[in-house]
Image (spheres, helix red, strand yellow):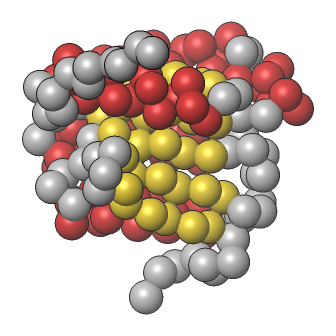
Amino acid sequence: MPSFSTKAFSLEYRADLGILIGRWLQALPPPELQGTYEAMLAAARDNDNCRFWLLDLRRRPLAGPDLNEWFRDQFSPQIASALGGPLFTAYLAGPHQRLAAESAEMELHLRHAATLDSYPLFYDDEAEAVTWLTDQQERAGVRKKQTSHSG
């Protein structure tokens, strides 16, 4: 049983893309927010240790200091070892979140993530985010290079 409301968070594995997609549909208190991340890790394990995540933050606030600390100190360090390789995360953020996404604090968070084999990037366009994730899959050797057809 999830520790969050399914009306507040949706989780889907897209086998055709090899991407795990989490969408927050509203703001959640930190314990439930942590539960959504735990559910994503469990779903990733259940789907061939999927290390390519698309996380839609547009309908919830970016995390506060308490959640960032939990994510940095407790959750992130276990992901790469649990999934057998680095985690690539494309975060979808809206214009109202741009200041927080580009803040000095977030820059420090992103640099720290890289030391833990976690590679997060922010996007405002879902198609660009998916393209980045599939490019990372090709580089990691988990997806064959797609040939483009011009016409």
* Front-most of residues 42 and 48: 48
Q: Is residue 83 above or below residue 122?
A: below
Q: In which quarter of the image is the C terminus?
A: top left
* Front-most of residues 19 and 96: 19
Tell me: 117 left or right of 4. left
Residue 34: tell me if it is visible: no
Tell me: 30 left or right of 58. left
Q: In which quarter of the image is the N terminus?
A: bottom left
Taking the spot 57% from the left edge, 31% from the top edge, the residue there is 127
* Percent of width and height locating residue 60: 76, 51
Residue extending furthest toward the bottom:
1
Q: Quadrant of residue 101?
A: top right
Taking the spot 77% from the left edge, 62% from the top edge, the residue there is 26
Residue extending furthest toward the right:
96
Taking the spot 68% from the left edge, 11% from the top edge, the residue there is 104
Taking the spot 49% from the left edge, 42% from the top edge, the residue there is 54
- What is the total number of numbered labels drawn onto the structure image? 0
Q: In this view, does 66 lie above or below 106?
A: below
Q: Quadrant of residue 111?
A: top left
Q: Is residue 66 above or below residue 117?
A: below
Tell me: 74 left or right of 85. right
Q: Is residue 47 above or below residue 68?
A: below
* Front-most of residues 47 and 28: 47
Q: Quadrant of residue 122?
A: top right
Residue 103: tell me if it is visible: yes
* Percent of width and height locating residue 35: 49, 67
* Percent of width and height locating residue 79: 27, 44
